[in-house]
Image (tube, grey):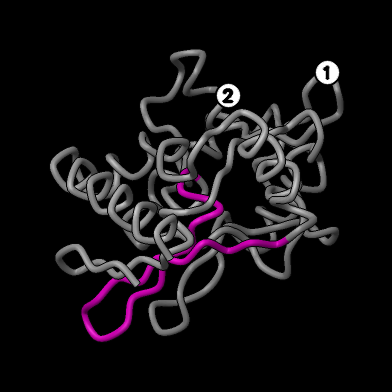
Amino acid sequence: MIRLGDVVLSDEIATARFACDISRCKGACCVIGDAGAPVSKKEIPILNKAYRQLKERLSEEAVQRVERDGVVTGDSENGYEISCVDSGECIFVERNGNGAATCAIQNAYYRGEIGWEKPISCHLYPIRLKKIAGMEYANFEYIPELCGAGCDRGNREGVWLSDFLEKALVRRYGRDWYNQFLETCNEVRSEKELA
């Protein structure tokens, strides 16, 4: 395990290679799962606003789900998550020309229509965060049907997970933390090579 301040990270975050390959996985992380993406309480008003802006682009089933259950489900005790349709697909899914699931929020961000890229849990995926006793634990959540294509591409192109997620990690923890994290990653990799 790696500890940086109040954050504990699994060694796999330093040693795994990963680069999304949406042409192969078809956006599986947005459509497969037993729950919606975890979100913080402070992200809920932003998601509600994004829904109002993007409603016309979302599927009819997604709109019906939101009108019935809201954009976000859950509570402060058990946590909050983005609503999903019956198939498990996130309500914010849009399909690109190749049929891959993409994020309507992120697409709008790229077009300059929204100033917020997407929930931090989505931005950090395949890293998942959990708070326990004031510490934040970050784990590489490897699920073959979701991450296999990304790991294959990362290995093929020599991209570390830590580098691929630079923007998301800086967004979450800041540039200074990330620079320290990279130094630690290099140390962990060197120790692994020597072992």
Amino acid type, mark 1: Gly
The quadrant where residue 174 appears = top left
Residue 139 magenta: yes
Q: Which of disc 2 and disc 1 is earlier in sequence?
A: 1
Q: Which of 124/73 is in front?
A: 124
Q: Which of 181 and 59 is in front in this view?
A: 181
Q: Estimate how packed mark 1 is, as few (under 14), some (14 to 19) or many (20 or more) residues with alpha carbons within 10 Å.
A: few
Where's residue 153, x and y in %? 68, 35
184 vs 117, left or right, is left
| 117 shown above or below 7 | above
Magenta stretch: residue 178 in it?
A: no
- The N terminus - image quarter: bottom left
Residue 122, position as x, y percentages in the image: 52, 48
Q: Is residue 190 above or below residue 18?
A: below
114 relative to 56 in the view: left or right: left
User: Pointer 2: what residue?
Assistant: 107
170 in relation to 134, above or below: above
Q: Could you say which disc has been placed on residue 97 in the image?
A: 1
Going by the numbered disc 2, the residue's amino acid type is Asn
Q: Which residue is drawn at 28% across and 53% down?
A: 187
Q: Dot 2 surroundings within 10 Å: few (below 14), some, or many (20 or more)?
A: some
